[in-house]
Image (cartoon, helix red, strand yellow):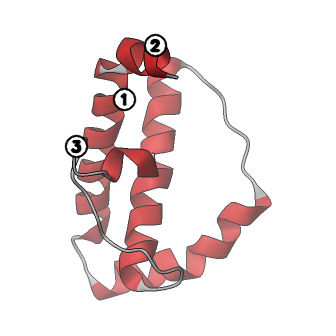
Amino acid sequence: MHWTGHASRCDREFGKRFCNAAYAFEELVAELGSAFLSARTGSTIEPRADHAKYLANWIEVLKNDHKAFVTAASKAAEASAYLLVNREELKEAA
């Protein structure tokens, strides 16, 4: 999901450093995007222990910006749509 942030794709860059608010926001976009893709494709996902380490950072972002969740969900939907629309092209390139 982070891959979609490149300027030639969805042009999204929120952060590059682990544990800052911008990076936490990008992680929230990625997690929501993964959930959206899983729901759309009928995939099942299993929670992973390493996901829990992001929770405190997400909570901080959400506390500090009451629009953060809606914005993250919007960016995640955009990234998910990009991947779904371009999936055949992406398969060929892989």
Residue at 23% x, 45% y: name it.
Answer: 10
Residue at 50% x, 42% y: name it.
Answer: 34
Query: Which residue is labeled 1 in the image?
Result: 83
> For the N terminus, which image quadrant?
top left
Residue 8 is marked as: 3
Query: Which residue is labeled 2 in the image?
Result: 92
- Locate residue 56: give its quadrant: bottom right
Between 54 and 3, the one lying in front of the other is 3
Task: Give residue 8's position: percent from left, percent from top.
Answer: 22, 43
Between 78 and 73, the one lying in front of the other is 78
Whichever of labels 2 and 3 marks the residue nearer the N terminus, that label is 3
Between 58 and 2, the one lying in front of the other is 2
Left or right side of 51 for 49: right
Task: Give residue 5's position: percent from left, percent from top.
Answer: 32, 52
Left or right side of 24 for 85: left
Q: CA distance from mark 2 to mark 1?
A: 13 Å
SS under mark 3? loop
SS under mark 2? helix
Q: CA distance from mark 2 to mark 3?
A: 18 Å
Q: CA distance from mark 1 to mark 3?
A: 13 Å
Amino acid type indicated by mark 1: Leu
Left or right side of 43 for 24: left
